Amino acid sequence: MSTTSSTYTYASLLCAPEDLDDLLKWLNDHSQSSVLIEEGDPSRLVFVPPDTASAEWLLMESALISLGATAIDLQSARQEDWQEIWKEQGFKSFTVGERLRVVPSWEDPEDRPALETVRIDPQMAFGTGLHETTFRCLEQIVETAGQWPKEPRSILDFGSGTGILGVAALTIMKEATLIAIDNDPYAVEATRHNLRVNGMEDRGLVYGAFEEITPATPLPTFDMILANVTGGILCSTTPMLYEMLSPKGRMICSGVSKEETDTVARVLSGLSGRMRNVPGERYDTFVIDKGRSPS
């Protein structure tokens, strides 16, 4: 990752809408950076590249062009300037149902006592609620808080990005604690930062890998697992994640493109419990309730 003092190099690529999913999947599979997505015609992806003087970057650039990137620009920004970048992307306050609202850290929220407030400073990580996968997960968190027989007390946010999902869950579920995992160092810092922004630093721990939690000892179990990643990652990690889900826990999975839906559904249907698909416009979200018979 290219860094000088507090200045970061980021890559911005343009592509046709029909190439967006392939490019995003490739970046998720081959880059440790979170990816900012701006859908449109053309669509735009923004991410932090490896050292731009390295062979790794040259190979990455060539692969992205072969997958449909029509232009790739390298730009520099100070970490504090990312707020302006997110403002340009249209990140502003929004509500999720009648229970929750998400507010950028630079905005003053309106006085609406009926709504719980989550404040988010994205920095250089993925997850503001602008993308449909994040929003669908937020909807399911709100639904769980309103309908689940017993409020979750332990939560895992796998692939936390900004930490928006874990922080939202802690905001609604007052007695819960959180473990967040992300292999992107910027996401780890963003999640820790957003826990502090919301006064929750004593309720959440953030790691870059499971091995950092309890080396050589069994992993903890969780009442709720949030995994907004990709279909490929879900297929490879779900068996491990499901073992960590408590006997009557709920797992919310998203980031599944329409092309991946059937494959992911086959993997998830092999788990014991009740699974349902919450279809979106371009991505699907799955909810699995452990300890419940398939409907």
Image: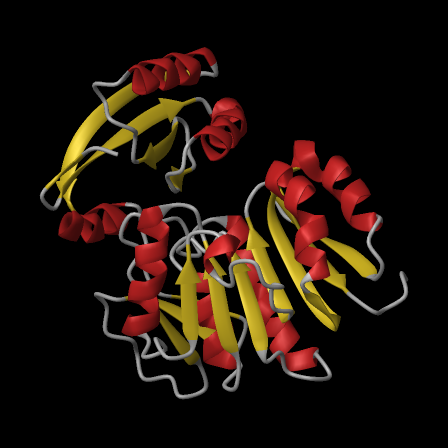
**In-image side of 275 versus 1 (left or right):** right
Percent x, y of residue 21 = 53, 30
**In-image side of 194 versus 227 (left or right):** left
Q: Compared to 51, does 76 lie above or below?
A: below
Q: Residue at x 56, y 58 (%)?
A: 216
Q: Quadrant of residue 57?
A: top left
Percent x, y of residue 258 = 66, 36
Q: Does residue 120 appear anywhere in the picture?
A: no
Colour pattern: secondary structure
Q: Residue at x 60, y 50 (%)?
A: 254
Q: Residue at x 36, y 52 (%)?
A: 187
Percent x, y of residue 179 = 49, 67
Q: Quadrant of the C terminus?
A: bottom right
Q: Compared to 144, does 228 lie above or below?
A: above
Give the mark count.
Answer: 0
Q: Residue at x 36, y 78 (%)?
A: 200
Q: Compared to 81, does 157 lie above or below?
A: below
Toward the left, the furthest residue is 5
Toward the front, the furthest residue is 216
Q: Quadrant of the N terminus?
A: top left
**In-image side of 174 versus 72 (left or right):** right
Q: Does residue 91 appear anywhere in the picture?
A: yes
Percent x, y of residue 84 = 18, 50
Q: Compared to 99, does 68 lie above or below?
A: above
**In-image side of 120 versus 63 (left or right):** left
Given residues 197 and 101, the one toward you in this image is: 197
